Amino acid sequence: MISLNITSHTVETLVDPFGLLSGDRYEFFLEVDVEEDDELYSDKGIGIRVLFVVEDNRSKISNYHLFERGSDKVLDFELEEDEELLVLNYCKENIGH
């Protein structure tokens, strides 16, 4: 069951100055709400930094990490499969927004 709710985001297009990487790359910073009884919960709030790649009409999450908002402390958690799918679809829908 999905326990996180994406409330807002910022996105930046990443530029490969040497032209070594194929496709387009984006860096998303997602702000998420999680339920108070969830192990991810923090009273400061939780964010997810996502490196998102679009190549040959396919898109994928290249990398992500969760962090505590305010302190930017990286949290040693992984998203569940359904949560990762939620993040993937969110990024697909919000490129350039």
Image (tube, rainbow, N blue to C red):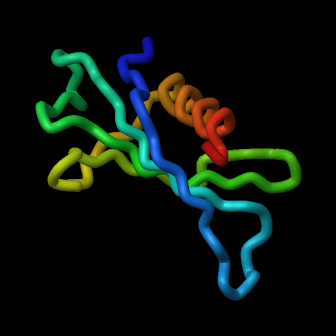
Which residue is most to the right?
Answer: 56
Eyeballing the image, is 52 above or below 97? below
Which residue is most to the bottom?
Answer: 18
Instruction: Give the quarter of the image for residue 24.
Output: bottom right
Query: Residue visible at 27% across and 38% down?
Result: 46
Eyeballing the image, is 37 above or below 81? above
Residue 87 % position (x, y):
53, 34
Residue 50 % position (x, y):
49, 50
Residue 6 % position (x, y):
43, 28
Quarter of the N terminus within the rendering:
top left
Which residue is most to the front?
Answer: 97
Residue 39 % position (x, y):
21, 27
Quarter of the C terminus within the rendering:
top right
44 sits left or right of 8 in the view: left
Eyeballing the image, is 19 above or below 81? below
Instruction: Give the quarter of the image for residue 92.
Output: top right
Query: Residue visible at 68% across and 54% down?
Result: 53
